[in-house]
Image: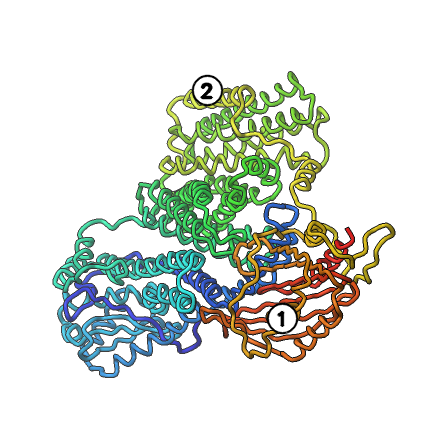
Amino acid sequence: MTGPGAGGTHHEGGAAADDTTGGEVGVGPGPRLPPDRLGWLYALVLASLISVGLSAGGLYFLADRSLSRPWAAAVDVCTRAHPIEAAAQSAGRDRCLAGQFRRRGVVMLAGAGIALGAAGALVLALPLADRRRLRRRLTVPGAQDRFADLCDRNGVAARRRPRLVVAAPPVRQAYTTGGVVGRPTVVLPAAVAVAHADAARFDPVVAHELAHVLARDVAWASAVRALIWLPVPAVLAAGLFEVASFGLNATYLTALGRATVVAVLTALLAAGLLRRREREADRYAADAGHAGHLAALLRAGTAARGRRLLARHPDPRTRAAALGRPADPPGGAVHGLAVGAVAMLAAGAADALVRDLFLTAHTIVGPPVAVWVGAVLLCLGLLPALVRRAAAGAGGWWRPVLGAAVGFAVTAFLATALPVPGSSGVSARPDVSVALLVAALAGPLAASVAGLCVLLARLVVARRPGSVGWRSATYLVAVAAAVAVLWPLPALASVPTDGHAARAWLVFALPRSGWPLLALLVPVLVGALLRGAGQGRRRPARRWDRGVVAVVLTAVLLGAGAAMWRTEVFPPHTLAEANRLAQQRWLLCAFTGWAVLVVLALGRRAGVGRALTAGWAAGTAAALLQYAHALATGRADGLDTAEAHLLAPLAWLGYLVAVTLPFLASRPAVPGPAPSTPGGARTPVAAVGALAALLAVAVLGPGIPWAYAPFPVAGQTGAAAASTAPVAPPAPDATPGPTRSAAGRPEPGRPLTRAEARRAAGAVRAVLPRGWRVPPDRGDGGGSRIDPSACRPLAEDAYLDRLGGAERVRERARYATVPGLTATASAELVVEIRSHAEPVPASVLAEAESARRACPRFTARGADGSAVRFAVDAQPPPALGEQSWRVDYRLSAGSGRTRITGQSAFVIVRAGHNLVTVYASAITEPLDERLLDAAVEAAVAGLTD
C-alpha cells in the first residue's frame, strides 16, 4: 500500500489523566507472552473494506444513469428475448447481458480499488499530521535513559527500537506513531516524561506503548482509525446524485440498505479492532508487573461520557476493572459472530463481482471463488484465536461455534433479502422466503466449519504444541475442508423452490464435483496428529486400539452386509428400483461411518479425533465392500459407476461428520487414559452394533423421508423444457419484394369493409417475436406544442387530414413489449388501416415528403413543461403497394447523465383505395428494422385476405 518512508499510525490512549494514555506503571520482569498481533482481525477489516468498496461501486453504478440506464435496458431486452422461465434460454440470456454486466463489474472493482487506495493514503497522510503535532519538542535526558532501559527489559530489538519524543503542550496523551519502513516513535506528554523517576507513573505508560511496537501493527492502525468514520459517508456519497436527481426509489433503497449494512459492519469491526489493541496492550503491561499501577492510573483518568459503539478506546474504568480479573480467553462468541458475518459478507461480494465480470461462466467460476473466500476468512479468522484458546486451557467451545453460525446466517439473510440488483439472478426484488432458506442453510454449514476448527485447534495444541509446520498444515487442511463443507451453499440457494432439483443435485452432481474430496485431508491430518505423544500424555494402551478396530469391523460388517443382503434377497427389476437401491447402499455406508464417530466420540476413552478417523475408516471400508460386491455381481462397470459407488458415500459421510462436529465441540479431542479392564471396549462395540443395525433397518425398511432422488433422464428433462418454452415465430425476410395478388385472391387496392380492415391490422400479430403483447389502445396523444410551428404538419401528420372526408373505414391495432424487470427499455408498434371511397392520390405522399424536407428537427413540449427533441431523418421505404414513404426520428429527452434517447419510424404504403401506416418506436434500445419490415409486409399482405 505504501512506499519507502511512508508514515504510520498513532495510538491515542485517551484513558488516563492529562499526562497518560493508558500505559503501564511499575517495575518488573518482562512478560513472557508477546501481545496478540491481531492479524486475523486486520484481515477481517481488510475484507470488509473491500466489500465496502464493491458495494459503493455498485451503488454508484446505479446512481449514475449514464451507466445504469444502458444496463437496465439490456436487462429488459435480453430477458424479453430469453425469458427467465425458459431454462434453455439461460446461456443466450447470459451472452446477451455479459457486456453490460462486465461494465458494472469494472465499476465495482474500481470502487474496491479506491477503497484500498484511500486506506493506503491514510497510512501516508496521518503520520504527516502526527508530525505536525510534534513540531514543539522537549529534551528530558533522564526520560531517554529510562526509556532505553525499559526497551531492553521488554526485549525490543535494536532494529525495531522506537524513538522517544517528548511533546510539549497541548499534547496530553501518549501515543505511538510510525511508518511501514523505519522505526516507530513513542510520543510522551511532558508531564509523563518529567516523572521518569517515578516508576509507578512512567513505566506503565511506556510498557503500554511498547506493546503496540511489539505487535508490529503501528503502521496499519492509522488506516483502521480513520475507517471508523469513512465507510458510511462514502456509501451515502456514492448515491447522492441519484437522490438529488430522481429522489428515493425502491431499487436505490434496496442497494443503499445493503451497502449501509456493509459499511456499518466495517465501522464497528474497525472500532472493535482498536479497542482490542488497547486491551491487549493493557494485558501485556499487566503481565510485566504493572497491573496495580496501571489500574490506578486508569481509575484516575477522565471517563468519557456516553461511550459509543464506534469509540476507539474502551472506557478507562472498564479497563481498570478488567485488570483485576482473569483475561477473557480468545475466540469467544463475539469473535465467532464477527468472523462469521465478515466471511459471509465477503463471500457474497466476491460472488457478485465474479458474476458481473464473468457472467457467461459464472456457474463455473462464481461458486468456487465465493466458497474459497468464505472458507479462508472463516478458518483464518477462527483458527488463530482457537489455538490460543486451547493453549490457555479454556473451555466453552460452543461459544465460537454458535457465534460463527449466527453471524454467518444473519449476514446471509441480509445479503439475500437486500440483493445488489442483478447480482441475484436479474431481478432487483428481494425475496424474504429465499433469504430465510439461505440463512437456514448457511448457519449449520458455518457451525460445521467452526466445529472443525475447534477440533483441529485442540488437536494441534495437544499433540504438536509449538510446531510451526504442523500448525501451518492445520490451517491448510482446515481451509480445504471448509471449502468442501461450504460447497453446497451456492447451489442449494439457487434452487430454493425446487426440492426435487436440490435432491438430484446432492445425489448426482455434488459427489462428482470433486470438491467434497478435499475433506479427506481431515482424517489424514488427524491421524498424523494423534501419532504424537503430546505433553504430559501417553499413548492409549494397545487393547483400546484393538477395541477401536473391533468397533470399526462391527459397523462395517453390519452396514455393508445389510446393503449386500438387501441386493441379493430383493434384487431390483426396474431402473427406478435399481436407482433407489443404489442410494440406499450409499446411505448405509455413510451411516456406518457416522455411527462409529458418534459412539466413540460420546464414549469416555477414544476422543473426538480418534473417533473421527475410525468413522472415516469404517465408511470408506463399507463403500469399498459394497462396490466390490457390485463389481462381482455385474452391477457396476466403468469409471462412472466407480464414481457413484465410492464418491457418493464418502461425500455424504463427510457432511454427516461436518454437521455432527459442532455438537461434539466440548468432548475430549484426544484419547483419554486406557481402560482398567480388558473388557473396557465391549460397550462401544455393542453400542455401535445396535446403532448400525437401527440405521440399516431405517434405511432399508420405511426409508429416510426426502432422502431419495429420481434418476434424471436427459430426454425427459429436455422434452419438459421444450414444452414449456414459447416458440419464436420464424423471422421474416427483411427485403420483401412488391406485393402481388395471388390468383383468386382479392385485390389489395379495393375498398375494405370494417372487418377486412380489422383483419389486416391484426395480421401483424403473427410476426411479433417473443415478449410482445396487445395492450389497451391509448389513442393519439395531443396538446403538445411544436417548436418551430413550421414542423407542425410533419409532427401531427397533417398531410393525411385532407383525406378524412372520403374515409370509409379506419382500424387501429397497437402492440408493445412486455414490461421488463427494470421497466427501462420498451418498444411499440401502431398499425392503422384506412380505406377511402376514392383511390388515394399520389399527391398525399408527395406532400408528406415536402413536410419532411421542410423540418430537419423540432421540439414537442407538453403541458407539464417536459420537452422531447426530434431529429428528422429518412430511410428507404419498403417496396410495397403502389407507392410507399418513410420518415425516421431520433428523439431525446433530458440532458447529461439523465438523458433518455430513442428511435422511431413512420411508414406509409398506398394501395388503391387504402393506406397502411405503421409507426414503430424504441426507447433506450435499438429500433428493430427486421420487425418493422415484417410488420409492414404483414399489414399489406392482410389487405388481400
As drawn, 868 above or below 451: below
Residue located at (51% from left, 20% from top): 693
Label for residue 686? 2
Q: Could you tell me which secondary element the residue under label 1 belongs to?
A: helix
Categorize mark 1 by other alpha carbons within 10 Å: few (<14), some (14-19), many (20+).
Answer: some
Q: Position of residue 554 (x, y in %)?
A: 52, 22
Which residue is located at x 49 percent, y 34 percent? 656
Report the residue that reaches farthest toward the top: 569
The number of discs equals 2
Q: Position of residue 422 (x, y in %)?
A: 52, 56
Q: State which quarter of the image contains the N terminus.
A: bottom left
Q: Position of residue 714 (x, y in %)?
A: 69, 38
For the residue pair 338 and 42, the one nearer the viewer reads as 338
Are dots 2 and 1 in contact, CB under 8 Å? no
Labels 2 and 1: the sequence-earlier one:
2
Q: Secondary structure at mark 2?
A: helix
Name the foreground residue: 717 vs 132. 717
Answer with left or right where residue 243 lies relative to residue 767.
left
| Mark 2 neighbour class, 10 Å CA radius: few under 14, some 14 to 19, many 20 or more | some
Q: Is residue 640 above or below residue 54?
A: above
Q: Is residue 308 left or right of residue 184?
A: left
- Residue occupied by mark 1: 798
In the depicted structure, whether residue 56 falls above or below residue 331: below
Q: Three-letter amino acid code at disc 1?
A: Ala
Residue ID at (30%, 56%)? 33
